Image (cartoon, coloured by chain):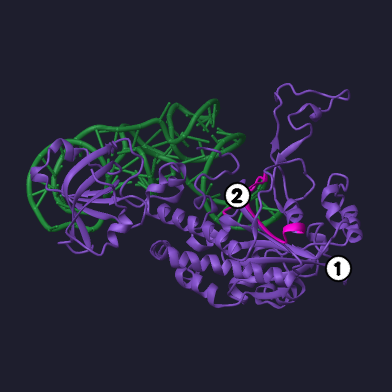
Amino acid sequence: MSQRTKIKALLESEQTGIDVTVKGWVRAFRQNRFIALNDGSTNNNIQIVVDFENTDPALLKRITFGAAISVSGELIPSLGQGQKFEVIAKEIEILGDCDPEEFPLQPKRQTLEFLREKAHLRFRTNTFGAIFRVRNSLAFAVHLFFQERGFVYLHTPIITASDAEGAGETFHVTNFDLANPPKTENGEIDFKEDFFGKATNLTVSGQLEGELGAMALSDIYTFGPTFRAENSNTTRHLAEFWMIEPEVAFNNLDDNMDLAEDMLKYVIKYALDKNAEDIEFLTQRLLEEEKQKPQQERSEMSLLEKLQFCLDNDFERLTYTEAIEILKESTPNKKKKFQYPVEGWGTDLQSEHERYLVEKHFKKPVILTDYPKEIKAFYMRQNDDGQTVRAMDILFPGIGEIVGGSQREERLEKLEQRMDEMGIPKDELWWYLDTRRFGACPHAGFGLGFERLVLFVTGMGNIRDVIPFPRYPKNAEF
RNA sequence: UCCUGAGUAGCUCAGCCGGUUAGAGCAUCUGACUGUUAAUCAGAGGGUCGCUGGUUCGAGCCCAGCCUCAGGAGCCA
């Protein structure tokens, strides 16, 4: 057989009457005559027309939903309605049988919950094919964006000894026999005996190491797996997720916000251009899904419109303090519709408050800045008011926080004072503090949750559906 | 972790007030048909009612505990 042509290329073919070879998985076999074949290069199938009267019935029987086959034949303009081209099969080879009695997937709509349990096979559905092609484009676009701007892709460690970052519960990394770890004289586990000679864990953030790189390379970004051992059971959290963390020397918070907004728009634009068909499919999928919902719960904009709107409009920028004022004066607050009424300044915003600001009040992405220092991390730059820090959170409709970042505290004295106040052990972070001793400069960065971005662009509702094999409490299957 | 809801055929779901042999659609299999597009028509097979214990003459249904899933909350990206 000749070299195979991918289905995406076939469907974009300029000429017909040529002999081609296609390989893929059977999506449907109708009337013993029409095979819908898909190879993952596009959501569209190529129709294969089988001369069933002159084909071995034993072979025909093996063309079942899910089977892998190779087909050689002539590409012609389709005789039927509904597709541009079709392949008149001259030779069909079964590469891999697929017993319909055993195969869990069925040629019909299946629930996302069911497919989540069959994550090893769900790539073969239209929805997940589209999701993972979009995910791929977004990941590539992230690199394109930063590389075009001269950023250095920095690989920060996945195993660290630092548990002082305050970014959540960590997964321990150890070589010990858990039933019988070495103990010290006072009965505590003796990590000096462990592989690294100290207690280690999986990283919860590459930021602190990223800052070290930025203090020489100026502009860096990380893009790697991140681990949180939080017992989070939500549609927005994973125990293992991918995070993008740029860190830029000499940037202030405004530069930081510009960078984040430019980046988000760049990668969304890239996916819209590159995956127009997939996003159109996902848009239709969402419309279908929302038909089940009552009118008032449906979104005002389709997925496609929402993404375009995001590109066409500036993100709304305001301070935490301004947000609190808006929330205090808001109708739901006055009518006591909020579960957590907005009264004073200083407490963290609840999900319902963020959602109100983004989805009801501004109706577009919102960047909140200058949060009270008490509710933010130790490394954020303190404002002159003594109350707030130069933090920023980007809130997206339906997702909530997609980016969290800040200008960093570069003044050693201020940083140490804050670490003391918050009980962060300075001796463990001696290397971090060194950057403030030797050529410190203003700098800023942020963390972007990659899966939350994919969630937004695909219009999916659960973060477990936008990563191939999700890890979450009580689940590490596959 | 907390709150709410769910778990019945391969999938999606119905199952009355606790009552005798647990149903439907789709899928699958068999046959018919053959330019179909979620093909159509006829027939057939298919069940540890999440698990454990309890109440009862009798439990898919009531009670308790546990497991899993979904949505929301918290934590955050």
Q: Is residue A441 left or right of residue A86?
A: right
Q: The residue marked by circle 2 belongs to what chain?
A: A
Chain given the colour green: B
Q: Is residue A148 left or right of residue A55?
A: right
Q: Amino acid at mark 1?
A: Gln
Q: Is residue A94 above or below residue A271?
A: above
Q: Nearer the viewer, residue A185 or A320?
A: A185
What span is colored magenta in the figure? A215-235
In the rendered image, residue A80, in percent from the top left (x then y), is placed at: 16, 62
- Is residue A234 part of the magenta span, yes or no? yes
* Residue ID for mark 1: A387
Vertical side of A206 occupied by A145: above or below: below
The residue where tag 2 is placed is A241
Q: Residue at x 58, y 71 (%)?
A: A359
Q: Kindly identify which chain the residue marked by label 1 belongs to.
A: A
Task: Name the residue rendered at 68%, 75% in the picture.
Answer: A317
Residue at image location 72% in from the left, 66% down from the top: A392
Give the mark nearest the N terminus, 1 or 2: 2
Q: In the structure shown, which secondary structural element does the residue marked by tag 1 occupy?
A: loop
Q: Which chain is purple?
A: A
